[in-house]
Image: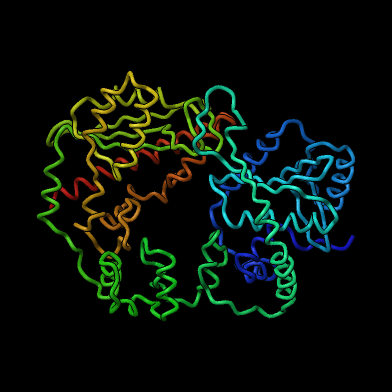
Amino acid sequence: MSEVHLSKSKYCRAVQCNKMLWLDKNMPEEKSEIDGQAVLETGIKVGELAKGIFGEYTDIEYNENLFKMICDTQEALKKSPNIITEASFNYQNNFCSVDILKNNKDGMEIYEVKSSTEVKDIYIDDISYQFYILSNLGYKVNKASVVYINNQYIRHGELDLSKLFNIEDVTEIVYSKQDEIKNKIIEIEEYMKQNEEPYCDIGMQCFNPYPCQFWEYCTKSLPENNVFKINKIKKKDAMNLYHNRKISFKDLAEENLNWRFKQQVDFEVFNYEPHIDKQRIREFMKNLYYPIYFLDFETMQQAIPEFDNSKPYQKIPFQYSLHYIEKEGGKLFHKEFLAESGEDPRRNLAENLIKDIPKDVCVTAYNMSFEKGRIKELVEIFPDLEEHLMNIHDHIQDLMIPFSDRMYYCKEMQGSYSIKYVLPALFPNDPDLDYHALPLIHNGGEAMDIFPKIKDMPKEEQKKAREGLLKYCKLDTYAMVKVWEKLKEI
């Protein structure tokens, strides 16, 4: 067998951008790190679980020697009818492993498993490439389907795989794409023969369907303050400006932009003094009163729901931090809760929350829709706690509003009202407010990722992880206190 050089992942990479595949082969050192480890781990877990969706199966064990996997597949195919996972095939240097293959007497069915909650175009390209290989090897493929997560499934008792997964038959469109697949493979082969780096301007392919790891490399010649640095601008709108040669903030200063975008650009270009609308801020501050509480939740999202009464990818709170001041000039107090990893945290968290926050007090959150959403979800599964939980819910004020509504803005916020930008803008070089100086957890994504893993760690690592979570969440609410104090000064 000749050397295998194109896999389904590489094929899909080339569908997004040929140059991405060329750079990956010829200049891998230019690749930037994109934090996709959690996504990768989720995909592996979902893929392993889905293998059992049709019952017993024969698994083709991964081997760096792909020929071994192909030979093992041929042996498994002799036992028809059966189900084979990671069934591996090669046709003219095009290799694929089929996630799930139903080897029926009258032909095959192939299933591509994704941890997404919808079927995306790139998934169709993926399974169409597999169909191309199998059909050209002479196999009769009667059906091609995408298996993906049903985010409406609510777990009750043992996992029900038939309800956890949706299966969408895409056979018809896969048939229709076979000439496209053949032509694309020829195009890739020719493209990859180039010895010199091929020219390819940036475009929407840099973001869709996945962020390109060569973005920093391909945009290294752009000015530091460029159109792609405008906070929350749609990628399509930024790309249109780029192709119209409106690239730097100086280029954009005369453009008719959304007022928020223009404010970010103008403050940077003209180095404006901070904008502080004192009257509106003072009106906002009238909504806050003593006793005042500062609340922040940390949540986890699991593709495979671990607990009863939970859905795939539901935001499940496992921790909170609470700073509070009971009266004007009073002392700052702190309380916190962190659940045990591996246990459903919600009941314990809800009971501690109503113990720690009295009724009718002023509660602040930063982006209150998040905290309010989690509280309402707790009420749905614990109706006996509804009265107190909804009292907390109804008394929450959003400390983000002065910044999201641009009552307070300075160029250091870089167009953002995230507390991770607001805090260093208001308190530059304050080591007590530096998230980067925290020992282990520096953002919500890291907190979300590490908490479910704690149960499987050695005791010493568990201790460090829990301490890291507590310090991170505590800084979130302490940061809110500092922001509130700054607003009080106005």
Query: Residue 178, image x and y in percent?
Result: 72, 62
Q: In this view, does 93 lie above or below 401?
A: below
Q: Quadrant of residue 157?
A: top right
Q: In which quarter of the image is residue 30?
A: bottom right
Q: Residue at x 29, y 44 (%)?
A: 366
Query: Residue 284, image x and y in percent?
Result: 15, 47
Q: Residue at x 33, y 79 (%)?
A: 250
Query: Residue 349, image x and y in percent?
Result: 38, 26
Specify the quadrant that holds the N terminus: bottom right
**Left or right: where 56 falls relative to 443:** right
**Left or right: where 389 falls relative to 95:** left
Q: In this view, does 112 lie above or below 27?
A: above
**Left or right: where 434 falls relative to 407:** right
Would residue 158 be visible to someone looking at this image? yes
Q: Determine the residue located farthest toward the top in the rendered image.
A: 384
Query: Residue 64, image x and y in percent?
Result: 80, 51
Q: Residue at x 88, y 46 (%)?
A: 74
Would residue 332 be visible to someone looking at this image? no
